[in-house]
Image (tube, rainbow, N blue to C red):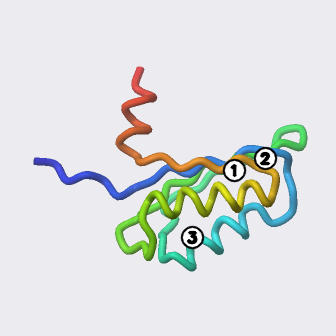
Amino acid sequence: MEKASDKTIITVLGKDTVGIIAKVCTYLSQQNINVLDISQTIVQGYFNMMMIVEMNGANVSFAECSGALDRIGDEMGVSIKCQKEEIFEKMHRV
């Protein structure tokens, strides 16, 4: 039987402001969540970032992480969403 992945997809979308990447990455680092891959773009003042993170050694549960990032996003005026990798893949299959 295949082991479930502890990878999580984090997406950030909103008006570009200073410190978005820093705030998200600082929180992840404090929770011992490793960033495996990151991509970000800014198009006409709108910020879009997608991260793949590893939750294996995390100090918090997926739900706690998702809630904390949601609150950080609210504080910054951006939308931050977390999705487990296996669910993300199933939703985006062609």
The residue under label 1 is 40
- The structure residue drawn at horizontal position 78% and vertical position 47%, both measured from the top left corner, is 47
- The structure residue drawn at horizontal position 41% and vertical position 20%, both measured from the top left corner, is 94
Asked whether the beta carbons under mark 1 and mark 2 sit within 8 Å of each other, the answer is yes
Q: Label 2: few (<14), some or many (≥20) within 10 Å?
A: some
- The structure residue drawn at horizontal position 69% and vertical position 50%, both measured from the top left corner, is 40
Q: Position of residue 83 (x, y in %)?
A: 48, 46
Label 3 SS: helix
> Mark 2 belongs to which amino acid?
Phe
Marks 1 and 3 sit apart, C-alpha to C-alpha, by 17 Å
As rendered, which of 35 and 59 lies closer to the eye? 59
Label 1 SS: strand
The residue under label 2 is 47
> Mark 3 belongs to which amino acid?
Leu
Q: How many marks?
A: 3
Whether residue 60 appears in this view of the structure is yes
Q: Point out the residue furthest to the top here.
A: 94
78 sits to left or right of 70: right
Between label 3 and label 2, give the one nearer the viewer: 3
Label 2 SS: strand
- The structure residue drawn at horizontal position 63% and vertical position 51%, both measured from the top left corner, is 39
Marks 3 and 2 sit apart, C-alpha to C-alpha, by 19 Å
Whether residue 49 appears in this view of the structure is no
Q: Position of residue 90 (x, y in %)?
A: 37, 31
The residue under label 3 is 28
Q: Position of residue 7 (x, y in %)?
A: 40, 55
Give above or below for 66 relative to 22: above
Q: Label 3: few (<14), some or many (≥20) within 10 Å?
A: many
Marks 1 and 2 sit apart, C-alpha to C-alpha, by 7 Å
Q: Earlier in the sequence, mark 1 or mark 3?
A: 3
